[in-house]
Image (tube, helix red, strand yellow):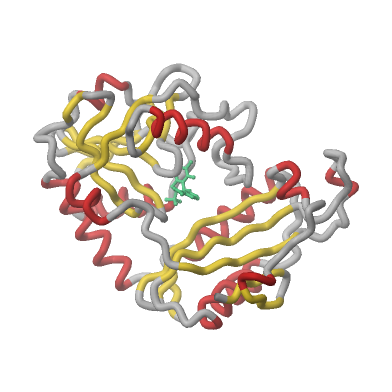
């Protein structure tokens, strides 16, 4: 495995950055998780745009432009001879001193690209569906650390993941400060009711997921009604189907929420239809390398 750091490739055991990097010291940086399928990078432009938006918000100057970052991602995929890959693109504030002040950093952000294969959940969970639970830790408030910023500080989500695991569940539903359903730890959430799709709007503590947007696009093509609307836990419990979306997880069915069986208790019609259509478009669309 070869890892890209600031324009050079390193073997995994040699891919190292400074312990003074503010990405490590403070989670001060941004990232993206991207996938490629059969040598097509899915929604690459959207991921790069979101990376630059996250960076702009935290006033982090990325030392390459969008074209150059795209070239670096493609070069890393080629270097690793990967046809299907999960790509982790990271930009940290760079090396500083032990204080918080980003002005003390050397002014040069660190760019890291790791390409690998990952399956987020075991195959059988895609067939059988996940059991998830609402956890006490709410999603970061947009007024504090806006979830639209895909920053390296994921403790909010990690705490929720720990709480889900403590309850013997595969994933966590995180609520927003008003108690509405926001999202899961690394995935957006959808429910199906009477053949219509519902997902929380992206303004209330929810990351605007690129898979979420792709699923909305696919659903509209299939003439399924889509509503970006606040969702309560009650609405999740009485839904016909529920599923999660994310680059790493893709589309994964949910069959139990807070001990309530969802619909038939098995991955059902609309979810399976969307999973199959999504798989189809990932084989056709994307930036070829
Ligand atoms: N919400 C959050 C909080 C995320 O971190 C998504 C939704 C889905 O977004 P995309 O654009 O990928 O459809 C994410 C995705 C993991 C993991 O291990 C997930 C993400 C990043 C890193 C790891 O589940 N982000």
Q: Is residue 63 above or below residue 188?
A: below
On the picture, is 101 further left or further right than 156? right
Residue at image point 20% right, 24% down: 260
On the picture, is 259 further left or further right than 140? left
Q: Position of residue 115 (x, y in %)?
A: 52, 69
Which image quadrant is residue 170 in?
Answer: top left
Q: Number of callouts in the render?
A: 0
Q: Is residue 116 above or below residue 82?
A: above
Q: Position of residue 180 (x, y in %)?
A: 39, 22
Q: Position of residue 256 (x, y in %)?
A: 22, 32
Name the residue nearer the viewer: 167 or 273.
167
Residue situated furthest top in the rendering? 178
Q: Is residue 285 above or below residue 180?
A: below
On the picture, is 99 further left or further right than 285? right
Residue at image point 88% right, 56% down: 106
Residue at image point 62% right, 50% down: 53
Residue at image point 55% right, 41% down: 148
On the picture, is 63 further left or further right than 268? right
Which image quadrant is residue 94 in?
Answer: bottom right
Q: Position of residue 140 (x, y in %)?
A: 56, 29
Quadrant the N terminus occupies: bottom right
Which image quadrant is residue 190 in?
Answer: top left
């Amino acid at each position: 495995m070869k890892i890209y750091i600031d324009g050079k490739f390193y073997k995994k055991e040699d891919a190292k950055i400074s312990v003074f990097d503010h990405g490590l010291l403070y989670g001060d940086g941004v990232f993206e998780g991207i996938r490629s399928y059969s040598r097509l990078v899915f929604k690459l432009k959207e991921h790069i745009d979101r990376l630059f938006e996250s960076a702009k918000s935290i006033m982090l100057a990325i030392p390459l432009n969008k074209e150059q970052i795209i070239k670096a991602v493609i070069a890393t995929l080629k270097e690793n001879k990967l046809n299907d890959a999960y790509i982790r693109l990271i930009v940290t504030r760079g090396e500083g001193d032990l204080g918080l002040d980003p002005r003390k950093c050397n002014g040069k952000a660190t760019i890291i690209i790791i390409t690998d294969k990952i399956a987020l959940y075991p195959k059988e969970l895609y067939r059988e569906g996940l059991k998830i639970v609402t956890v006490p830790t709410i999603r970061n408030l947009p007024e504090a650390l806006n979830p639209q910023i895909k920053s390296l500080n994921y403790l909010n989500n990690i705490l929720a993941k720990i709480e889900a695991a403590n309850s013997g569940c595969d994933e966590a539903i995180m609520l927003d400060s008003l108690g509405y359903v926001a999202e899961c730890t690394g995935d957006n959430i959808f429910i199906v009711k009477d053949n219509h799709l519902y997902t929380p709007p992206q303004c209330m503590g929810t990351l605007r997921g690129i898979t979420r947007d792709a699923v909305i696009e696919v659903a509209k093509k299939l003439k399924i009604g889509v509503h970006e609307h606040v969702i309560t836990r009650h609405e999740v419990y009485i839904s016909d189907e529920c599923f999660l979306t994310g680059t790493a997880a893709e589309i994964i069915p949910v069959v139990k929420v807070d001990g309530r069986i969802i619909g038939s208790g098995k991955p059902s019609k609309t979810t399976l239809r969307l999973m199959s259509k999504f798989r189809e478009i990932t084989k056709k669309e994307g930036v070829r390398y």
